[in-house]
Amino acid sequence: MKEFVRDWRSVVASVAGAAFVWVGVVGCASSEEVVDSTPRATATATVRPAATKAVVVGPTATIVPATPTAIIESTAIAVVVQPTVTMVPATPTVNVVEPTTTVEVEADAYADSELASLTDRAYELTIMLAEELSPRQSATEEELAAAMYLLREMVKLGYEVEIQDFAVTEAGPSGSIEVMASADGGEPEVLFSRRSGNTSRIFFLPFEPAKTGEVAGELVYVGLGSDEDFEGVDVEGKIALIARGNLTFEEKETNAAERGALGAVVFNNQPRYYFGGRLEGDPDVLVGGIPREDGVMLRDALDDGEDVVVELLVYPDGDGPSRNVIAELNNDIVGDQVLVIGAHYDTTPWSPGANDNGSGVASVLVVAEELADDDLPFDVRFIFFGSEETGLHGSNHYAGSLSQAEVDRIVGMINLDVVATGDLEVFGDEMLTEYASDAAEATGVDLEVAGPLEGAASDHVGFDERGVPFIMFYADELDYINHPSDTVEHVEAEPLGGTVVTVLGLVERLADSIEE
């Protein structure tokens, strides 16, 4: 018991990311001659688990996570908690308030129905997670507090719960640019394409080593960023927009900083989406790269005389301890098949994570409650993944730690990520998407079978690479994710309820196919 308490006292480093994890082209040298085409966020290097100690906590044990004063040791600790354990939260206390928010559901089809009840519960949980347990930045004390909440909730439902520790390593910085209202209060006229529709947000990949922080100011175009380009241009307290080419990234950043700029945004000169670069030393201002198409639109807007004001965010990177929360109903059948249902519970820094991914976590909790008493022909394993935002660390660690025999037992992996804003879509294994479509149609849920998201990844990736059939649920409005604007006001009830009822129908159809 003391060993458990000691290992769970933690003060940990801040880390950051973007997720879904947005996949980019990174690694340009300071000379700017090379663009590395390797996608950073889908790196599949597996962190194998350290030697694991199994700590079994008896029915009358009370586990008290202590105050955050020590670093979690590197040795992985598997904590198996029996369903009758009482979990006492750490100090400082995280108050989990019973949700009082109710959702008004229009549409006659929802009234007095099971779908209405599932929708209400998923909606209320999503709001609670955003308001009471956010942000949950990867590898922080707040992420740990969220893991303890999830552990307690699954124990209450009768599940056996294991905490799987892992180390977050090589977490890279990330950021974004928000085109804001102009100084006179007018709405931004420059809009950028992200999949379908328009957005005023641009993915910004900081150059490394990265300076982190948040600045806002008027955007000013300064050509290639040479001394001559800056002549007669006032960038004091503003953000410099710079074309890639001729000079090193170091020279562009230095020239902007010496003239009082708050940041430097370099747009690519090649038809590739994201790109990053390396600097010779620590930068004096926030600096990084954006896609060529977005940079050209900004430049053209400035050339046309528009006032463009932007907010530039660079999230901190860092390494540290994180964890997966794994819950499973006790099943005495040795070698039984397993269905994995998962969602990541971490957020990007400074973000409430209402949609990304409080929505997925809330949906999984409701599904777990509904399935707790069901007699299914397979085990259902619920996994809440840590540190997804910094590079799919939790899911890659879990999938990579499985033996081939364990992989062969998995009949499918259901991944829920950003399911609260927009139209509900799925992609993945043909059989699983067919079952999902049938379940949605039977309950009146609008569901589209779509292709994989370009430039994005989520927790199904590690399973797919091991050959596990998967299905990914998401809603297609992605403008607010990975940002402080991912708040409860953008959460929609309908896709949440649709996700839960469709997953339940999918599970039922999968069970029927196995029993036949």
Image (cartoon, grey):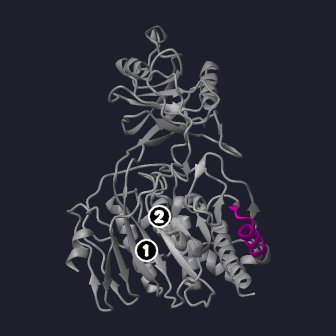
**x then y, percent, for residue 345:** 47, 64
Q: Left or right? Give the position of 448 relative to 252.
A: right
**Which quadrant does the N terminus fall into?**
bottom left
Labels 2 and 1 touching (C-beta < 8 A):
yes
Q: Is residue 101 visible?
A: no
Q: Left or right? Give the position of 51 relative to 67.
A: right
Q: Say which amino acid is labelled 1.
A: Leu
Q: Is residue 364 visible?
A: yes
Residue 150 is labelled as 1
**x then y, percent, for residue 102:** 56, 74
Q: Would you place residue 337 above or below residue 35 in this image?
A: below
Residue 495 is labelled as none
Task: Find out whether residue 429 is within the magenta segment.
Answer: yes
The secondary structure type at the circle numbered 2 is loop
The one nearer the camera, 142 or 231, is 142
The one nearer the camera, 438 or 401, is 401
Q: Would you place residue 484 above or below residue 304 in this image?
A: below
- Find the magenta span and give its range: 425-439
Q: Say which amino acid is labelled 2.
A: Tyr
Real-space CA distance between mark 2 and mark 1, rounded to the nearest whole angstrom: 9 Å
Q: Would you place residue 281 above or below residue 60 in this image?
A: above
Please tell me how crowded label 2 is: few (under 14), some (14-19), or many (20+) other residues with Cα within 10 Å. many
**x then y, percent, for residue 116:** 66, 78
Identify the residue at horizontal 41%, vertical 48% (top origin): 171
Total number of numbered discs in the rendering: 2
Q: Main secondary structure of the magenta part?
A: helix
Which residue corresponds to mark 2?
Answer: 345
The secondary structure type at the circle numbered 1 is helix
**The residue positioned farthest toward the front in the image shown:** 404
Identify the residue at horizontal 61%, vertical 69% (top origin): 414
**x then y, percent, for residue 379:** 56, 82
Mark 2 and mark 1 lie on one chain; the one further toward the N terminus is 1
